[in-house]
Image: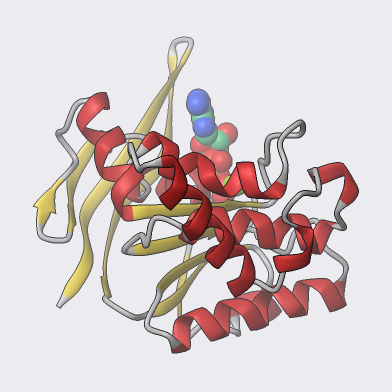
Amino acid sequence: MSIISVNGVTKHYALGTQTVEALRGVSFDIKKGEFIAIMGPSGSGKSTLMNIIGCLDIPTHGTYLLNNQEVSSLDDDALAGIRNKEIGFVFQNFHLLARNSALDNVMLPLKYAGIEKADQITRAKAALSEVGLEDRMDHQPSELSGGQQQRVAIARALVNNPSILFADEPTGNLDSQTGHDVMQLFHNLHNQGQTIILITHENEVAAEAQRTNLY
Ligand SMILES: Nc1ncnc2c1ncn2[C@@H]1O[C@H](COP(=O)(O)OP(=O)(O)O)[C@@H](O)[C@H]1O
Ligand SMILES: [Mg+2]
């Protein structure tokens, strides 16, 4: 069963009087439990594609089915609802709240989902343990290494049990050993059945996935 089905997706941006064609008819399917890489050089449209399949934006043309639901024509509120439930994001720059502890950062998606406070704490602690940070829960991002910050971001992305884990250049700001450790964590999650989409411009990173879509 396909968890994602993208068909003939284009994205045009208006830039003054010009139109930028960021995507020109992209089609592919991703099955539940797959670990795939989307690879291409800078400017090839990777982030544009991620915004569409991550329900942050809609295509200009084409269709996008997520869990058999057509999402390419939904309004912003409906997209936000699906995004919070179905998708966990990991970014190159971690995107953690600087003045919040690791635990508070990981609790945030549960708070948005209206989960009771005691459950937020229990589940966020479990997610942090899963990424090996049970002894760093009260640390703020500035008190953590880059690799540890990315682990917090991964715990935050997973705490809602999303259908898809989406990572845009997740090792881009990490040294090679730490990047390797983060990739190992993705492998462990994949072995537990997590569907993972990894966006990268690096061959070695893409080679870690089962399959690569080139742009
Ligand atoms: N909001 C925007 N407005 C206009 N052009 C954009 C916008 N976002 C991206 N683009 C253009 O679309 C193309 C693809 O960009 P992007 O998806 O960011 O590529 P990548 O992530 O692969 O580097 C580029 O030519 C970029 O300049
Ligand atoms: Mg990009």
Number of numbered discs overlaid on the protein picture: 0
The reply, left or right, for residue 124 in relation to residue 144 is left
Q: Nearer the viewer, residue 40 or 150?
A: 150
Furthest-front residue in view?
118
For image coordinates 68% across by 35% down, the residue present is 97
Quadrant of image for the N terminus: bottom left
Q: Is residue 50 above or below residue 147?
A: above
Furthest-top residue in view?
16
For image coordinates 87% across by 43% down, the residue present is 142
The reply, left or right, for residue 53 in relation to residue 199 is left
Residue 139 in view in this figure = yes
Q: Nearer the viewer, residue 122 or 170?
A: 122
The location of residue 24, given as percent across then percent down, is 34, 47
Q: Nearer the viewer, residue 67 or 51?
A: 67
Q: Is residue 197 above or below residue 146?
A: below
For image coordinates 44% across by 75% down, the residue present is 36
For image coordinates 42% across by 51% down, the residue present is 119
The location of residue 61, given as percent across then percent down, is 20, 39
The reply, left or right, for residue 6 in relation to residue 45 is left
Q: Is residue 200 above or below residue 211?
A: above
Q: Nearer the viewer, residue 143 or 57?
A: 143
The location of residue 153, given as percent across then percent down, is 63, 54
Residue 58 in view in this figure = no
Colour mapping used in the image? secondary structure
The location of residue 147, given as percent across then percent down, is 79, 63
Quadrant of the rendered structure where residue 75 is?
top left
